[in-house]
Image (cartoon, helix red, strand yellow):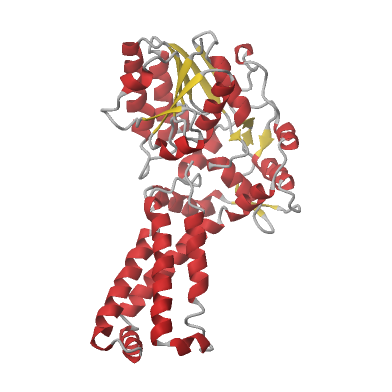
Amino acid sequence: MSRRVLILGAGGFIGAQVAAAFDRAGWEVRAAARRPARSARRAPAFDWVALDFADPDADWAAALSGADAVVNCVGALQDGADDSLIAAHVDGPRRLIAAMRSARVHRLIHLSAVGADDAAGTDYARTKAETERMVAASGLDWVILRPSLVIGRGAFGGTGLIRALAAFPLVMPMVGGEQVFRPILAEDLAEAIVAAADAPPGLTADLGGPQAVSQADLLRRYRAWLGLPPAPVLRVPRSMARPALAVGDFLGHLGWSSPLRTTSLRQMNHDVAGRDAPWPSALGRPPRGFDVVLRQVPASVQDVHHARLWFVRPLAIVTLSLFWIATGIITLRWGWDASVATLQAGGFGDLSPWIAGGGAVVDLLLGMAILKRSWSARAAVGMALVSVGYLIAGTLSLPHLWLDPLGPWLKVLPGILLALYVAATEARR
């Protein structure tokens, strides 16, 4: 008879790998996520349930029904629009432990992270350490695993940023470069988590690969893996990186969970390798080293495109936002008379001021909306549709402007394509 596992955070990068690994091992998988609809389309064979650690009324009893083990892959790097460290690392795990006791489900595998201790000086590490203390005092049959940098074909978070820096034109910028990682392949980590379901309780282990790699060497190896020509490492002083990190912190409050934030740098400076301890025999075979992984998982053209476009997409969003906001402001202020005169020349008569003002307001709203993560794709589609509307109206009223040497109608076409690019590349893990 197959056993059932409840995987919390199954829609994430690691959680999805863990769900697949348990499925391969013959377990019945119940997958939990905050917004499971998209993940359920990707893996319809799993029993998906909606479960939010921030919801005090979450139906834990239903989620735990019939479960033989629970894997907690829920985590957050920093507080933001969609993330709360207290909810992810304190309140949610506390409710989980209480619910497991009530449901008499004993085996809990908690996925933490290296450097999750109070000495790191970040809220991330402090709350992660608090979770570990709660799990250790829970009275459950627990196992705590603390992976180092998790790598895989799917590039999210820190792995995506590292690949993007490796694919940067001409140089490879980095802050520091001396930080040491012990990369572990996501599939190898997932297999270890499956083995942990039958490991002796009370095990706490830092899980890193057998090969220690500095940040600088990590980028060099990734650049070669992508098939790009060698480039020098550009070491950026920490003082110069602070403005970019501050922008990353601000974007987190708009829903953009960028790895380029102050917490990331402080954690890297504290510990990203973990303790150099033997791989626990209870977790099966040791993971593959970084060089072995790169040799056995060859890069595809999609990997190259993703790495090169990592910074292009946010720049496209900022460019669209500034363009549409500037258009609205210019129309309402310095360009008002010219805008009304152009509309009147197109035959709109007394409606011209209303059309100019309404169009400017729409431009402003779309320019601001695209900056919020949850609205960005819809705002980009809105920009494309509004631009098409402008072109149709302009063609009917002022068709001669298609032949204007400054190309006022022709220049709208690249903006439409840029908006469609942003909309088409919207994806959440």
**Residue 235 appears in the picture as rendered:** no
**Quarter-wise, where is residue 95 in the image?**
top left
Image x and y of residue 239, in percent: 52, 51
In this rendering, position of residue 362 left or right of residue 243: left
In this rendering, position of residue 345 left or right of residue 45: left
Image x and y of residue 197, in percent: 52, 14
Q: Could you tell me which residue is drawn at 38 percent across and 86 percent down?
A: 397
Image x and y of residue 317, in percent: 46, 60
Q: Is residue 322 above or below residue 221?
A: below
**Quarter-wise, where is residue 122 in the image?**
top left
Q: Could you tell me which residue is drawn at 41 percent across and 17 percent down?
A: 135
In this rendering, position of residue 75 left or right of residue 227: left
**Residue 128 appears in the picture as rendered:** yes
Q: Nearer the viewer, residue 160 or 51?
A: 51
In this rendering, position of residue 138 left or right of residue 405: left
Q: Is residue 184 above or below residue 351?
A: above
Q: Nearer the viewer, residue 35 or 258?
A: 35
Please identify the residue farthest to the bottom as the structure is shown.
345
Query: In the rendered picture of this protein, how many numbered marks are placed on residues?
Result: 0
Q: Could you tell me which residue is drawn at 39 percent across and 37 percent down?
A: 35
Q: Could you tell me which residue is drawn at 66 percent across and 27 percent down?
A: 209
Image x and y of residue 162, in percent: 61, 45
